[in-house]
Amino acid sequence: MRQHKAMFRYVEEILYSYDRKKKDRASSGEKNKNKIAYDRYEHTQRVYQWMIRITNELREDKLDLESLKIATIFHDVGYGNPEEDKPHGQISSAICRDYLERRDYPPEKIDFICYLIEEHSNKKLFHEKSTPVELVVLMEADMLDDTGAMGIILDSWIASKDEKATFESVCRHFEKYTYRHMKQMEFVTAPGRRFWHEKRKLVYEFLRQYRRDLGDMS
């Protein structure tokens, strides 16, 4: 556990070492989050907690929990080096590899951890049977953050930054991001599905009531 605390401190230092105002990522989702004081380190901590919740309920004897924990801690550290013109998974993987190699981790373990980090945004692998359960869990934990109740607040926070924001424009933003994402995505593990369906139920009910409050009588 002590080594994980050291890893968290290392990741925290990197993520807080750059000026967020100068950060410019390619994806529209990141540009949206650039409008607010989105804290990538706090996101990492929340994803780690979701990973623990999933694995505590997961019946999987061959799960490499240690590698999964390390990959989760480092999965977004690449956002602390926004100057590199590469996907953040690749940057995060390289940072993690350097950290682990300097601490004499076994090469095969490093390779697996870095694979998890580099591919955690590759949703094409999510439902493939050959995908390691560790990668599936990391993806699920990552998506469980910023969704459900958090997604409602996050989308409202982002949309409110528009000088011409209205209740209607906030609703459209919510439908475009959190609602559409949760409607389209299905999870793989049993605990992941349960958590996701709980969040989805909340989102659907919130949108139903929000539309009613806006005057939608359908």
Image: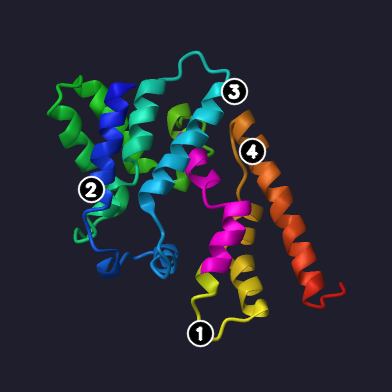
Kindly report the distance in space between the C-alpha atoms of the residues bearing marks 1 and 2: 32 Å
Kindly report the distance in space between the C-alpha atoms of the residues bearing marks 3 and 2: 32 Å
The percent position of residue 61, horizontal first and vertical second, equals: 50, 13
* Residue 147 shown in magenta: yes
Query: Mark 1 highlights which residue?
Result: 163
Q: Earlier in the sequence, mark 1 or mark 2?
A: 2
Q: Which mark is residue 57?
A: 3
Q: Which mark is residue 14?
A: 2
Q: Earlier in the sequence, mark 1 or mark 4?
A: 1
Within-10-Å neighbours for mark 1: few <14, some 14–19, many 20+:
few
The residue segment tinted magenta is: 138-157
Height in image: 150 above or below 137? below
Report the predominant secondary structure element of the magenta stretch: helix
Question: Element type at marker 3?
Answer: helix
* Residue pictured at 38% horizontal, 36% vertical: 72
Q: Earlier in the sequence, mark 3 or mark 4?
A: 3
Q: Camera-side residue: 102 or 39?
A: 39
Q: Earlier in the sequence, mark 3 or mark 1?
A: 3
The kind of residue tagged 4 is Phe
The kind of residue tagged 2 is Ile
Q: Which mark is residue 195?
A: 4
Within-10-Å neighbours for mark 2: few <14, some 14–19, many 20+:
some
* Residue pictured at 15% horizontal, 28% vertical: 101
Please report contact status of discs 1 and 2: CB closer than 8 Å, yes or no: no
Q: Is residue 59 left or right of residue 48?
A: right
Please report contact status of discs 3 and 1: CB closer than 8 Å, yes or no: no
Q: Camera-side residue: 213 or 106?
A: 213
Kindly report the distance in space between the C-alpha atoms of the residues bearing marks 1 and 4: 35 Å
* Residue pictured at 44% horizontal, 68% vertical: 32
